[in-house]
Amino acid sequence: MKTLIRFRLLQGMALLLILAFLISFGKPIKAEISNSPSSDTADSLIYLPVSMKNYPWRSVFGTQAQNLGDEAMSSLAVDAGLDWVRVNAFNWAKIEPQRTDPPTYKWNSVDQESLKAAKDNGIEAIAIVRGTPDWAQKYPGISCGPINNAELDEFASFLNTLVKRYSVPPYSIKYWELGNEPDVDPALVSPSSVFGCWGDDGDRYYGGRYYADMLKVAYPAIKSADPEAKVLIGGLLLDCDPSKEKSCKSGKFLEGILENDGGQFFDILSFHGYPHFGASSKWDHRGGVVLGKVDYIRQKLANKNLEKPIFHTEGSLLCHPADIANCEPPGTDFYEAQADYLPTLFVTNWVEGIEATIWYQFEGPGWRFGGLLDGDQNPKPVYDTLQFMTQQLGSATYIGRVFESTPVAGYKFKTFAKEIWVLWSPDGAPHNVTLPSSYDHVFNKYGDEISLTNNQLEVGSPLYVEFNK
């Protein structure tokens, strides 16, 4: 673990030196978009100082984890090459169960060791703040639900104290997510659910306008405690698309936030999206459960002339509940499909401009077997594909597509030492491509090298093609 941490520090120092050099000379870097790494043709120019303006550099690779205070779990997270960890960190109902004057906070209810471990290992934490105490509930008995309007100022005071405490060492949290899938009606979940439940089925905008009222007091409280803090909307479930389903009320939650001028009171818009193995989704008409939701989000933001970074704060490939007979436990087909899906999810999100993607979850077996680890907390095949992907792309820059119109998806990345193509077959069927003779190595999703004859490559599952400079 220490070796990896030292490597990351050296990597960061190298990036800083290059950044300083490029800023001084202002030289553009050519992004070669042709299907040959040695081509002189360039479709665009990329100024590296612009692409790295949010230094220190972080990849899009993340997961949700809860036990990073455990040395074995922390070591597995570091070895996976993760740059982000989402943590179910702060439950207001547990921290301030009674209202007192002055307030009394039970910080011992917080898993501070996990938050500290993330910082110590150079992993950026996204901290979820959720849970409404009995005395502050808009709907008595619903701790996952909204805060009573009369207590919003108390919530703001709590947030201000919370951020002052945890935005500095040894925790140094900068990303604060307010709730978890708030666009769910309380009637659909248990009162103490870990997700939901600010939704209001009787409201035109499903409670989104009231969530915006909360943001209007929460955002200034967080920013006054730490001007560098980033505030995320609680990851939206977006269970359906109201532009397609007229009966879809929950999809109006985001629109309600924006209609009530909530767009000025968050920095990052986060959402959740999971495909189920072998099943379709309600978002296929827009490009699938992930890209379809991104398309909807961007449309709603554009309608208000807003541009916001987007985080995909929960995603993985799940076993479908209708196929539960094959999910106890799943078979090899599922685990292989999950291992295929992970690199395609992260790469596609990266290409689409999603700035962080969180695999839900790290620990196993996970919800509907979505975990990176199994029930004994040992790596699954999907963990192995994550580890190899981050080794290949953890310090890379995306530079363009490999192909313009083929049945094979292909994307180019560059590191300081090599160019890497990531290829796969979106339709699942094998397709043949001819590689340039200048390629050096081809690896499968697990990092096993593949030998070719006459530069012919059959593409199905994700593959990595290396061209050394």
Image (cartoon, rainbow, N blue to C red):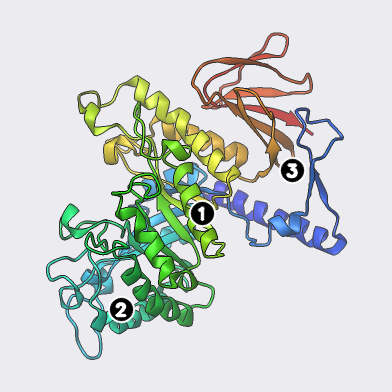
Mark 2 vs mark 1, foreground winner is: 1
Q: Position of residue 372 (x, y in %)?
A: 38, 38
Q: Amino acid at mark 3?
A: Phe
Q: Residue furthest bottom?
A: 101
Q: Which residue is mark 2?
A: 155
Q: CA distance from mark 1 to mark 3?
A: 36 Å
Name the element at disc 2.
Answer: helix
- SS at mark 3? loop
Query: In the displayed structure, would residue 131 be above or below residue 326?
Result: below
- Which residue corresponds to mark 1? 299
| Number of numbered discs on residues | 3
Q: Is residue 48 above or below residue 347?
A: below
Indicate which disc, 2 or 1, sits on the residue closer to the N terminus. Answer: 2
Using the image, determine if residue 139 lies above or below residue 37. Answer: below
Q: Would you identify the image quadrant in which residue 181 lies?
A: bottom left
Which residue has dot 3 on it? Answer: 416
Work out whether mark 2 precedes mark 3 in sequence or the reverse, and give the earlier one: 2
Q: Nearer the viewer, mark 1 or mark 3?
A: 1
Q: Amino acid at mark 2?
A: Phe
Q: In the visual, does 47 lie left or right of 449?
A: right
Local SS, label 1: helix
Residue 188: x %, y % from top left: 18, 53
- Judging depth in this view, the residue of 154 and 363 nearest the camera is 154
Residue 279 in view in this figure: yes
Q: Position of residue 343 (x, y in %)?
A: 51, 35
Image quarter (top left, top right, bottom left or bottom right) of the C terminus: top right
- Mark 1 crowd level (few <14, some 14–19, many ≥20, 10 Å Cα): few
Give the alpha-carbon distance from disc 2 to disc 1, as whole Å: 31 Å
